[in-house]
């Protein structure tokens, strides 16, 4: 049987600009042209979920404590999130996307990949399709989305962020090499601050620097990620747009009004979280799909730490043990506690399980 998959695909990554804040500004014209943020109140240790570009001009950013945001911008308007309205706006946006292709992979309420390789509109031009989608979202919903068009998901995501806000950026197949060579390594997914620091120490600052190194060297320095870096530095990404709706994890978390000091402070909250997680797993009928359990902590310096372990079911003692191990490594006041399970992909009818 021959593989009929096209060698070059047409992928669009679409991301709404400051989505929650944009919905608030659309629904309340008094917020227009004023610094606006969606988040929790300063007197309850709230954090900023998102903010508009007027607020960003003052240095306000997502995940920033509201108290600090107000110091940077005293005139900042902070409104509580209204997820009912955000979900309704998201549903309307995705309805437009699905008029062009059934291959839509949601990443969040305001972000998605679209595979338009076989879309007939505009004679199959991904650029014209993206342009029309952006125009329709603005005209019909009063919201702005930015789009990136490229032959794969990795490049499309970078492209959508390239010309924000209100942007459309296209990377055509023959432009990949020229575009990728000067791309900073921080743009590669999976490269966080620690990995970037190590890469800079090795003289790896751009994709051109990565290309100059052989695969064995990258594997020696970065393990399994070395192969990913090797491929991405060449603009290669074979991941398909996944529209099967498979859930990859289930989790719960809570942020505390006052920092917790140690594991004994955490245990009552851990039990509550576990009961909530168990209900969610049961409602999703996902108990048989569990393959890992994990615990996540956010410390009072806003650094996030996590630990995970293989598991066949969700068990409170295992989460308690993971919590103990994580706190032994990171002994600091705890601002947030979360637990969750990672799920394997369900076997489809008639599909044999893979042998490992």
Image (spheres, grey):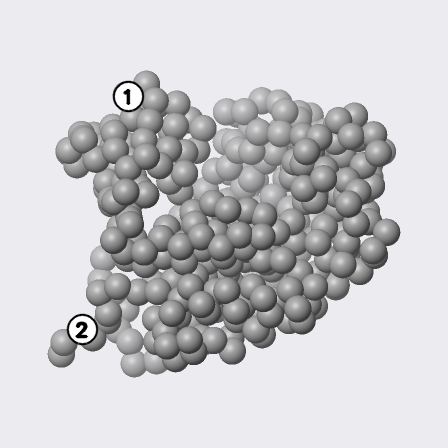
Are there few (<14), some (14-19), or many (20+) residues within 10 Å of tag 1? few
Q: What element carries label 1?
A: loop
Classify the position of the N terminus by image quarter.
bottom left
- Relative to 166, residue 121 above or below: below
Classify the position of the C terminus by image quarter.
bottom left
Give how far across and how far down residue 18 sits, in percent: 65, 49
Can residue 66 be seen in the rendering of this structure? yes
- Relative to 181, residue 130 above or below: below
Q: Which of marks 1 and 2 is in front?
A: 1
Give how far across and how far down residue 17 sits, in percent: 61, 51
Q: Is residue 268 left or right of residue 188?
A: right
Q: Name the residue under label 2.
A: 3
Residue under the point 42% across and 26% down: 194
Give how far across and how far down residue 301 sits, in percent: 63, 24
Structural distance between the alpha carbons of marks 1 and 2 = 40 Å
Residue under the point 54% across and 41% down: 295
> Quick check: marks 1 and 2 in contact, CB under 8 Å?
no
Residue 189's mark? Answer: none
- Image quarter of residue 267: top right
Q: What element carries label 2?
A: loop
Q: Is residue 43 left or right of residue 121?
A: right
Residue under the point 77% across and 54% down: 25
Q: Mark 1 points at which residue?
A: 203
Q: How many marks?
A: 2
Give how far across and how far down residue 54 sits, in percent: 72, 39
Question: Closest to the observer: 245 or 53?
Answer: 53
Question: Closest to the observer: 293 or 216?
Answer: 216
Name the N-terminal-most of marks 1 and 2: 2
Q: Is residue 117 left or right of residue 112?
A: left
Question: Closest to the observer: 239 or 92?
Answer: 92
């Amino acid at each position: 049987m021959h593989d009929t998959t096209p060698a070059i695909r047409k992928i669009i990554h679409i991301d709404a600009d400051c989505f929650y804040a944009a919905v608030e500004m659309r629904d309340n014209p008094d917020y227009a042209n004023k610094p606006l943020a969606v988040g929790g109140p300063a007197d309850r240790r709230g954090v900023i979920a998102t903010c508009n570009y007027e607020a960003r001009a003052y240095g306000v950013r997502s995940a920033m404590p509201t108290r600090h945001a107000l110091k940077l911008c005293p005139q900042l308007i902070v409104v509580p999130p209204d997820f009912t309205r955000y979900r309704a706006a998201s549903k309307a946006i995705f309805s437009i996307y699905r008029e062009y292709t059934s291959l839509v992979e949601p990443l969040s309420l305001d972000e998605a990949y679209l595979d338009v390789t076989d879309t007939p509109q505009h004679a199959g031009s991904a650029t014209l399709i993206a342009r029309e989608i952006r125009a329709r979202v603005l005209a019909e919903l009063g919201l702005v989305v930015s789009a990136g068009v490229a032959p794969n998901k990795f490049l499309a995501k970078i492209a959508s962020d390239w010309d924000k806000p209100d942007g459309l950026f296209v990377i055509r197949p023959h432009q990949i090499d020229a575009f990728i060579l000067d791309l900073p390594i921080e743009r590669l997914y999976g490269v966080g601050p620690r990995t970037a620091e190590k890469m800079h120490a090795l003289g790896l600052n751009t994709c051109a620097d990565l290309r100059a190194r052989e695969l064995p060297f990258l594997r020696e320095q970065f393990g399994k990620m070395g192969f990913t870096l090797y491929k991405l530095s060449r603009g290669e990404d074979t991941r398909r747009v996944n529209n099967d709706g498979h859930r990859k994890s289930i989790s719960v978390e809570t942020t505390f009004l006052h920092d917790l000091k140690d594991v004994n402070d955490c245990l009552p909250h851990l039990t509550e979280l576990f009961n909530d997680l168990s209900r969610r797993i049961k409602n999703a009928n996902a108990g048989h799909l569990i393959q890992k359990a994990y615990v996540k902590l956010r410390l009072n310096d806003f650094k996030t730490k996590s630990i995970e372990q293989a598991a066949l079911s969700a068990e409170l003692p295992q989460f308690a043990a993971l919590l103990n191990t994580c706190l032994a490594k990171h002994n600091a006041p705890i601002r947030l506690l979360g637990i969750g399970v990672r799920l394997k992909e369900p076997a489809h009818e008639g599909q044999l399980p893979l042998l490992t």
